[in-house]
Each structure stands twice: as C-alpha cells, then as structure tokens.
Amino acid sequence: MFKKILIANRGEIACRVIKSARKMGIKTVAVYSDADRNALHVKMADEAVHIGPPPANQSYIVIDKIMDAIRQTGAEAVHPGYGFLSENMKFAEALEKEGVIFVGPPSPAIESMGDKITSKKIAQEAGVSTVPGYMGLIADAEEAVKISDEIGYPVMIKASAGGGGKGMRIAWNAQEAREGFESSKNEAANSFGDDRIFIEKFVTQPRHIEIQVLADKHGNCVYLHERECSIQRRNQKVIEEAPSPFLDEATRKAMGEQACALAKAVGYTSAGTVEFIVDGNRNFYFLEMNTRLQVEHPVTELITGVDLVEQMIRVANGEPLPFKQEDLKINGWAMESRLYAEDPYRNFLPSIGRLTRYRPPVEGTTQHGGIVRNDTGVYEGGEISMYYDPMIAKLCTWGPTRAAAIEEMRLALDTFEVEGIGHNLPFCAAVMDHPKFVSGDITTAFIAEEFPEGFNGVALPGAMLRKVAAAAAAMNRVAEIRRARVSGRMDNHERKVGDDWVVVLQGEEFPVAIRADRGGATVAFADGAAMRVESDWTPGQTLARILVDGQPLVLKVERATGGYRVRLRGADLKVHVRSPRQAELARLMPEKLPPDTSKLLLCPMPGLIVKLAVEEGDEVFEGQALCTVEAMKMENILRAEKKGVIKKINASVGGSMAVDDVIMEFE
C-alpha cells in the first residue's frame, strides 16, 4: 500500500480524502494557494506545499506546480478529488510519465468519457439511448444560434470539459442562445482551460438520476445503486438522495447494468458515475460519465456502507474489489444538503467573507437512531474566498426510511449555525418541508416551478407557529426571571414574573397563559388548547433545543430590538413576547417603510465588473442586459427590471464591487 498520497485539490473534498487515507495509515500531502494558507485541509494534512496565487489557473490547475509538489514530498500517488485536474487527461499522463499512481481511471478512459462530446459519440456507437444534440465543435455565437434553431428550443449549452454547473446555460430563444454561448465559453475557459462548447436538446420535466460504478484492474465492475439529483438550481445540484424515490427494481437493475457495460467498454477502473435523464415513464437516456468521485458520494456510502475513497485507493494499488454485485444491498435512505456561500434572499448570488460563527450539528448516531454526517473544509473564523466554488459543507443524514432521513435532515439543518455570510441553509430547510419533495414528486424543474420568484423565506403553517409561540413564551419567562434576579428585584419577592403574555410572530397574535413547574411549563392558548414545553435553554444561548408535547424543536435564537430573532425550518421570524398592555399599545405603532432603491442598480454580490452593456444616456427596456458581474467563477448578467434611462454609471470594467454598491443610477 502507498505510504504517502498527495491530494491535488482543496476544501471539503481534500479533507474527505485525508480522513480515509488516515484511517488506512497513509500519510497525506496538501497543496494550497495564497488564499488557502490557513485552510482546514492544510491543517489536517501531514505535509503542505504552497503552489501559487489564489486564481485556480495560477495554482490548482497548473500541472507543473502539482508535479513539483509531488517531487518535493515524494508522494507515490495522487488523489485529484473533483473539479480542477480530476478529469484532465494531460495530468494523468504527466503522472504516468513520472511513475506516480493516479487514484482514478487510466488516461484513455478519461479521454473517452471525460470529454462530453466524445463520450456521447461512444455511447451512441454502443447503442445507448442519448438526448438529441449537436456533438461537433461550435465556432461562434451565430453558429450556436443556427444549431439551436435546428434542434428546437429549449436547448442546453454545455462546456465540453465542464462540471459542477460551470459553463452551462439553458436557452429558450435565439437571444439567450447567443448570450449563453458567450458566457459558457468564458466560464469554461476560466474554470477548465478548455472553451469547447456543445449543444443538446433540453428535455423538460426530467429527473436527473445517476449510477455509481466501481471497477478494478481485474475486470470486475459493480454498481452501487443510484442517486436522485433532481433538486437543482442553475444546473447545480442542491439536494441529493439515495436511493431514488422514483425508480423500481427493474429500472434500477437496467440502469446499473448499462452503466457497468459502458464502463467496461472504455476500460474504466476506479469510482465513476454514469448520469442519466429519466422521464415520467422511467425511460432513461445517457447524459455523460464523470470519470471521478462525485460531490454527492456520501449518500451512496451511507446506504451501502462502502468507503468509496478507500476503494479508489485500493483499486489504484492493484487490489481487486472485495465484494460482488449481489453483496451490495440498499440499507435505509440518505439525504444530502449542499451548504453554499450564497444569499438565497438575493437570488442565490455568491457571498464571501468571514465565518463569524460555524457550528455544524454533532456527527454520529442521533437519539432517534439516525446518522448525521458533515463533510466540510471550513472552520469558525475562516474566510470564504471569491476565487473558488462557494460550497461550505455537505450535510448528510441517514434514516431507515425516506421519511426518517428527511426528519433527521430537518433537525440537522435547524441545528447548523452559520453566521457572517449569506448561506442557503434556510432554502434547504424549505425544500425538506415542501409537500412535493416530501412526496417524492420532483423533477429538475422543481426549484424553477416551486420558487419562480426566488426565495423570500418561509411562512410557517399554523400548527408550527403555535409550537414556536409556546416555546417563545416559555423561553421569555426564563429570560424575564433571570433579568429580575440580576437586577435584584426578586430578592424579597417584590416582583413576580407574570403568567399572561401575548406572543406576536408572522403577523399573528397568540395570547397565552403560562403555568410553570420544575420540569418545564404548560402554555395555554386562548382557545383552550395547551402545549407542554421542556428545555434546558438559558438566556444567551444561540441554540435552543426544546421538546414541545414530546416532539423535538430546534430554534436559533438571538435578542433583537423589542424581542427575539428566531430561525427554524427556513423561516426567519421577529418574535415579540409582550404583556397584554404592551401588546395593546404596540398595535398603535406605525410600521417603518424600507428605503426606495427603485432607481438604482445595486451590486447583488461581491465580484468584478467584466462587462458594461450600456452607456450613460442610453434608454433601456425591461429585460435588457446592463452589465455582467463575475464571482466565484460564475458570470451573472444583471438586467433592467423596467424601462428607463441611464443617468450615471459608477462602475468600470475590471472594477471590484461589494454587496449593495451602486453600479448605475436611472433617471
């Protein structure tokens, strides 16, 4: 077995590989850019080598720099993680020439299947059903429009060397095809150093289901069942699960066998994923093969008990697979929520900054018999950089059933504390409670259809509101008693905390009466209903773990002017607990109106202005492109919301902008 492995990656996947290598007694080498000098993967590895400036094209994807790090440390093998050089044939070839083992497939398989155009041609020749499209290289935007017209809209514009949603656009008309081609080409060049683009028909109402395969150097290949990856935003997976709630055993077997046949046809070894698009009748079509470990591999590990990273290392070492297809059963259900540094209240635009608070839920077996796992590459006090993918962590849960796995995820998301940056935890929580998701009735259009206006938070249903109201009333009583004791007003029993309160949240009032005892409190509502609240929460704690009528409820709590800020299940609530007289007076107070920004174009995220499409004095129309902001390797086109005239432009191409900086003003 190898004594030392270099990990040619960063972030959570580098940390993930280090964990398996450490378990196997293998020393690890991390590589890092200037921006990652204090990163978690650098701290976890046995050795670390600096490889250059923050931009990936000056550090992580420069093959010569990685090769130098290998020579410096004497690493015998390299695990590429995903992204960066993981599907780069030239990198695999460079390692082969150096006599260093690549923990991945042989370079011919990467060449065959890593390139999306080539892989589709091979699949077609092998008789695999594929989505209609144009597999040749496309010269320019006008040719892209012509091809798109012939295929018929909508079309998917994809980077040949792409992955992770980078260099990918859906076009519904010629204008979007033209703009999408240019943006995809730019993103592909910046992210992968390869700007080749292809176009295929975009199948509406599809499910995205992928098969995990594992093959050794002795001719053995197995499939570790499927992952449902249909919850996507901008072609970037957000929620994954295993198995799929849609497949039956016959379809699962057919897809798995076809995936293995394709892997064997190209001499594939190591872990890989064959992605399919599946229609409502369970017809499936080959999309692409990812010749690497997938981001969402933990859910497969949770339902099979197989450590995929360990098996990749063992296969690279020449060992045969220790199991056969019949040994791989599905045990329970697993969910994964990708935690991204992006602001769901600003149309999910990237967010950067320091993690002033980062407290993930405790990993391991839960009190309900489930499992919580959190793959991460950050820590409290660390910074989220603008240079790399915005993923912070992958929160995974396991339960014996799908419903149990979802409930474990709900509690885990509510327990996860992240402050200092915008993040998508509230959105992930909203998905877990959405009736369509809970029923398993999902497609890749789920987010676009169910959140057409973006995400503006969650309005909690009545039953949950009452639980929160009861919990808030009981917590406020504890806080009031503490305040009275600190002030000394209870020493001689001069003042007692009252029993009657009015809880105001989400625009509703709940008059309640509290009867407290040593074990907790009973909160009675005006309609005669009552709830039992038990908790060891004390004022100042940011996380409140509460039992309401015996059911667990987790609240993120902080003091706010005139009350509390309470967050749970995707909702962000301002909660007031008032005496009856205070509530009466509060009803007379006018509401403060927000400032008018209708004549300003504000920068929605930190980034660079890469294009200005208008000039001062120009008349613009609704939907017209105004400028392009690049952040975290993604180009974001900002458009006019209504007709107007450009009064002033405050930004310039190449300029750096912060959140809410004024890019331009309108008359």
Image: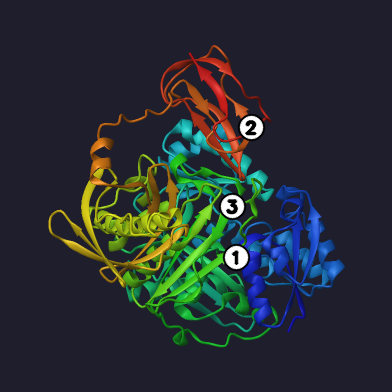
**Amino acid marked by disc 2:** Val
According to the picture, the residue beneath numbered tag 1 turns out to be 291
Q: Nearer the viewer, residue 86 or 46?
A: 46
In the drawing, does residue 614 fall left or right of residue 275?
right
Residue that carries the numbered disc 3 in the rendered image: 356
**Nearer mark to the viewer, of 3 and 1:** 3
Please tell me which residue lies in front, 401 or 538: 538
Q: Secondary structure at mark 3?
A: loop
The disc placed on residue 476 is none
Residue appearing at x 59%, y 19% in the figure: 649
Q: Nearer the viewer, residue 358 or 666?
A: 358
Q: Position of residue 306 (x, y in %)?
A: 53, 80
Q: Percent from the top left, x then y, of residue 63?
A: 78, 57
Q: Say above or below: 200 vs 519.
A: above
Q: Residue at x 80, y 62 (%)?
A: 49
User: Is residue 19 toward the left or the right of residue 124 in the image?
Assistant: right
Q: Secondary structure at mark 1?
A: loop
Q: Cα distance, mark 3 to mark 2?
A: 30 Å
Counting from the top left corner in percent of width and height, residue 646 is at 52, 16
Residue for badge 2: 610
Q: By what rule are the colours in the image chosen? A: rainbow
Q: CA distance from mark 1 to mark 2?
A: 32 Å
Regarding mark 2 in the picture, which secondary structure is present there? strand
Distance, label 3 to label 1, CA atoms, is 37 Å
Label 2 Cα crowd, 10 Å radius (few <14 / some 14-19 / many 20+): some
Q: Nearer the viewer, residue 572 or 608?
A: 572
Disc number lying in front (1 or 2): 2
Q: Amino acid at mark 3?
A: Thr
How many discs appear? Answer: 3
